[in-house]
Amino acid sequence: MTWVIVAVVAAILVANLLKLLPRGRMLHIQRLREAARKLGYRVERQAESEEGGPLEHCVGYRQSLERCSLQEEFSCQREGQGWRWLSGDAQSQSTATLLDALPAEVRRIDRQSFSVLVFWVEPESIETLGELDKALQPLREGSSA
């Protein structure tokens, strides 16, 4: 009888511990963010965005870069099938190529003097993070040249 009581108590404790462990989407997000940190990104929680706005459910991934000139700074937001320029040179061919290479989950990109900040809906696949990193490679190369 004592063993039955011990087994029931142990089962209850194990069940409560399993509820605390991350699983499913939470575990995937943890792995994705850890992979991003290894690539040099800082994950930034976004301040509350407007309900139904273009940045709703987005998380910011920031990567430090070498300083760029004011003319090289830009900010773009995805709208439908294209991009809306918020600031910067809309005629820049290198920036247009960069925007075309970004994964579909990216909603906004801001190239600031010492960093690039990408707002995106975190994807289902970690491989998409690799696509993002590859798309941002010209910014790293351009800043080191």
Image (spheres, rainbow, N blue to C red):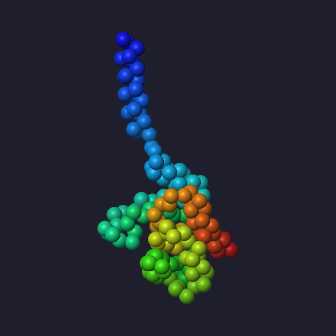
- The answer to whether residue 74 is seen in the rendering is yes
Give 108 or 22, whichever is nearer the viewer: 22
Residue 41 rendering spot, x and y as whole percentages: 55, 60
Vertical position of residue 135 compared to residue 70: above or below: above
* Residue at the extreme left of the image, as rendered: 51
64 left or right of 79 in image: right
Residue 132 rendering spot, x and y as whole percentages: 57, 66
Residue, x 49% and y 73% (percent of image)? 110
Give 109 or 2, whichever is nearer the viewer: 2
Residue 141 rendering spot, x and y as whole percentages: 66, 71
Vertical position of residue 25 compared to residue 53: above or below: above
Residue, x 57% and y 81% (percent of image)? 96
Vertical position of residue 22 compared to residue 57: above or below: above
* Residue at the extreme bottom of the image, as rendered: 91
Residue, x 31% and y 68% (percent of image)? 51
- The answer to whether residue 69 is seen in the rendering is no
Residue 22 occupies quadrant: top left
102 left or right of 5 in image: right
Residue 44 rendering spot, x and y as whole percentages: 45, 59
- Quarter of the image with the C terminus is bottom right
Residue, x 37% and y 66% (percent of image)? 56
Residue 18 occupies quadrant: top left
Q: How many marks?
A: 0
- Quarter of the image with the N terminus is top left
